[in-house]
Amino acid sequence: MRISTIQVPTVETPAVRIPTFQDVLAAGERIAPVVRRTPVLRLPGTRVLLKREDLQKSGSFKLRGVTNAFAAAAPSRVVTASSGNHGKAVAMLARAAKVPATVVMTAASAPEKVETIRGLGARVLFVEGGVAERNRLAEALAAEQGATLIPSSDHADVIAGQGTTGLETAAQTTGVEAVYVPVGGGGLLAGMCLAKGAWRAAPAVIGVEPVSAPRYALSLATGRPVTVPPSTSVADGLRGQAPGRVALPVVAAGVDHLTVVEDDEIVRAMALLRTHGIVAEPSSAAAVAAALKADHGRDVVVVLTGGNIARARFEELTGREDRLSREIHSYAALAAA
């Protein structure tokens, strides 16, 4: 894959709008004709219920937020920044709406995700640097082109759309103790916090970050946004460097707990899911890993956020059958404890 990078110009940052529970309800009605109502299925032998967003039309929950943003803005041209899943959802909606789309990515983006986005007709640009530079370039391009910017997470309409995951889960479950959500940009976590109002008895909302990128945990602990060094976590979708300006206050007001997981825990969770025929990308499996090692007396929900991972990469991470057996034995004992 040939990569040419672009220098990032400086642009002014506009004021932000903070979404509400009513925005989530409105998003639920708006996106219902487009998105799939995904099932909630039990991970056999555990208290873990999986909200199967890996079965969403785009292969991830990102389609929810993008659909809501498209419906609200009716764009004639779109620009976004993405590590993969969000860019795929934008490219899908742009192709359906017959509008041009540009997706800005870093040079470290997974090649298979890049090619998928290109295959859907979107233009892909690569940026020098990391997530912060990627996001700034997308903002600059949108301003230059007069295009609609659809951020991957830090946008009121996107967050409201992601929150519809919580609306569905509330209608599909009863007596749930907690909901585990992987945290990248924080849009899904913020949406799930807003969706608490849909439950008769709201479960605890627990955000899960890689141990190498605990942005939200540090930000809430210090009372200010904290930027962390670029992460090399296997969970490529959870490597963002700074919490969102829109998402952070929503998370601060609604999250019950934040926890971290190691890469080896993520890989073990992927291997366990594999034995049940589920292909989960590392970012998705992170929340499964956190739920399995916690001590709960009742059922918990894990948002299985996506399954967009190349087969070769999945095989590389989960390993050969001899290694897989050892990993499964370890996790089976942990899940039964």
Image (cartoon, rainbow, N blue to C red):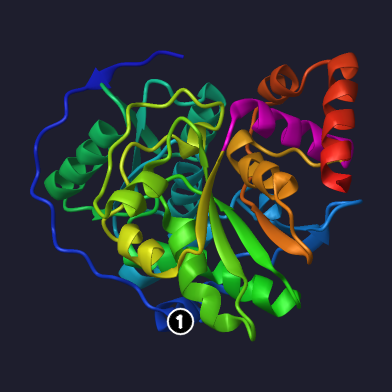
Q: Determine whether 314 is above or below 204 in the image.
A: above
Q: Is residue 279 visible?
A: yes
- Say if the magenta span includes residue 293: no
Q: Which residue does the image show at 37% across and 42% down from the upper left? A: 215
User: So how many labels did they put on this image?
Assistant: 1
Q: Amino acid at mark 1?
A: Ala
Q: Which residue position holds label 1?
A: 26
Q: Which residue does the image show at 66% across and 26% down from the upper left? A: 264
Q: Which residue does the image show at 35% across and 59% down from the upper left? A: 247
* SS of the residue under disc 1: helix
- Percent coordinates x, y for residue 135 in the rendering: 27, 40
Q: Quadrant of residue 329?
A: top right
Using residue 32 as the reference point, say whether residue 280 is left or right of it.
right
Q: Is residue 34 visible?
A: no
- Percent coordinates x, y for residue 127 in the rendering: 27, 25
Q: Quadrant of residue 132?
A: top left
Q: Determine whether 181 is above or below 38 in the image.
A: above
- Say if the magenta span includes residue 264: yes
- Percent coordinates x, y for residue 233 in the rendering: 51, 27
**Mark 1 Cα shell of 10 Å, populated few (<14), some (14-19), many (≥20):** some
- Percent coordinates x, y for residue 250 in the rendering: 36, 66
Q: Determine whether 308 is above or below 23 in the image.
A: above
Using residue 250 as the reference point, say whether residue 207 is left or right of it.
right
Write down the region rendered in magenta. Answer: 261-276
